[in-house]
Image (tube, helix red, strand yellow):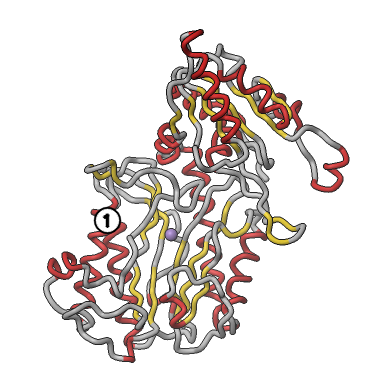
Amino acid sequence: MKKLDNQIFQDRRKSFLSKLDGKAAIIPGAKLVQHHADCEYPFRQESNFWYLTGFDEPDAIALFLSHKPIGERYILFVHPKDIESEVWNGFRWGTNGAEKVFKADKSHPISDFEKELPNYLMGADEIVFSVGKYPEIEPIVLNLWAKQIDNYSRIGRAPRAIQPPGIYLNQMRLIKSQYEIERMREAALISAEAHELVRFNISHKNNERQIQGLLEGFFFEKGTRGPAYNTIAASGDNACVLHYTANNSELKKGDLLLVDAGCSLPDYYNGDITRTFPIGGKFSGEQRAIYEIVLEAQKKAIQSVITGVSSSDIHNEALKVIIEGLLQINLLKGGVDEIIENCSYKHFYMHKTGHWLGLDVHDVGAYRLGDYEVLLENGMILTVEPGIYISDRIPIPEGQPDIPDRWKGIGIRIEDDVLVNDQCPEILSSVACKEIADLEI
Ligand SMILES: [Mn+2]
């Protein structure tokens, strides 16, 4: 793993602390999650915790104390050095490492959290903590808060409220710094190269699982943490199941293969790309017709990724092309506006056209604030991923035509990762080909 640049995390902490302005934030890291019996899933740090600390061990807790003097504001509770545990579970930084390497002002063993917290929270105007997410830490925080409120009448000071950390961190994470943009370019590039590997090798593969293996093997070979989310390798009608992850069907010539996969870098930045390939190297007439609509919708939507537009503007760009295309091949009937108004396209296109992308695959950040749409700004990264899925799972809306069998079992999505950059969207995942001429053999 590339050595982490401490300055990046220090700058983020400084900015977070200045936003906190008198408040104390308690940001817990992730815990290991049991897979079965004595086995756990690979550790995945909590994204807010990671964003502020760069510390990659389980069970840690960070405090950010903006009400304290400089040099007493960043506290890390970590597993202490313990040779016996380290023999079984690997190296730990311990409290010393947390201070020396991760630049905590002070570090304590996790077991001291309850004992130390009152002193640290003393004098804070408010507490910033995510209620409802940390069943072991929450009672400690709430009990302490109750005691401090109880004391209010005597000492005249106590935190007056608990706020969620997202109020401060979501906007910071939504706008990517130059450093983060570079990391996202790398995540998208490796993810795109994996899709190219599928394009080149699909004719030698006969099962969805082998496609998954090809992608994920490449992710590991490149030194990433592996897939950012459960890889989707969905052939034929499986592609109409949006979160299909069984990945165990045989690949049949004549079917399409929808691949939705991206890697997660060692520092957790993620790619998220979808391509749809003709398994036998040629699209059928019907498959081609649908593919052309989705591709046009995706290109139009990407063109609209400029500063000042909203996510729903982008969605509407894609939606219009999809509806017009489906009208032309008689899979829909009526006027475009009326179809949008009645949602009578949703048996073909039932999801939105994209989401924010970053440390979380569905990254933090609002899409609207009450009545107002969030408008794109430079440094935001989002996916653009329209699709059409033709199956008989969803009842056909009233007044819409029956679907002839020859269209059924076609599921197509095309997804790229796009950086907002004034009037000129940068497609981070452009290495993955998507033109029909490149996908056919
Ligand atoms: Mn996506």
At 11% from the left and 72% from the top, the residue drawn is: 335
Name the side, left or right, on which 428 lies relative to 1. left
At 53% from the left and 18% from the top, the residue drawn is: 148
Name the side, left or right, on which 10 lies relative to 125. right
Q: Mark 1: give few (<14), some (14-19) or many (20+) Cα within 10 Å.
A: many
Number of numbered discs on residues = 1
Q: Going by the picture, which residue comes out furthest to the top?
A: 155
Quadrant housing residue 1: top right
Name the side, left or right, on which 326 lies relative to 52. left
At 16% from the left and 64% from the top, the residue drawn is: 341
Give the image quadrant in which the ligand numbered 1 is located: bottom left
- 392, 301: nearer the viewer: 392
At mark 1, the secondary structure is helix
Q: Is residue 3 visible?
A: no
Asked if disc 1 is less than 8 Å from ligand 1, the answer is no
Q: Amino acid at mark 1?
A: Ile
Image position, residue 211 (x, y; %): 58, 74
Image position, residue 164 (x, y; %): 45, 34
Q: Against 154, is 162 above or below?
A: below
Q: Which residue is mark 1?
A: 314
At 28% from the left and 41% from the top, the residue drawn is: 369
- 52, 26: nearer the viewer: 26
Image position, residue 6 (x, y; %): 61, 30
Image position, residue 210 (x, y; %): 62, 76
Q: Against 326, is 284 above or below?
A: below
Q: Against 441, is 322 above or below?
A: above
Name the side, left or right, on which 267 lies relative to 343. right
Q: Is residue 186 visible?
A: yes
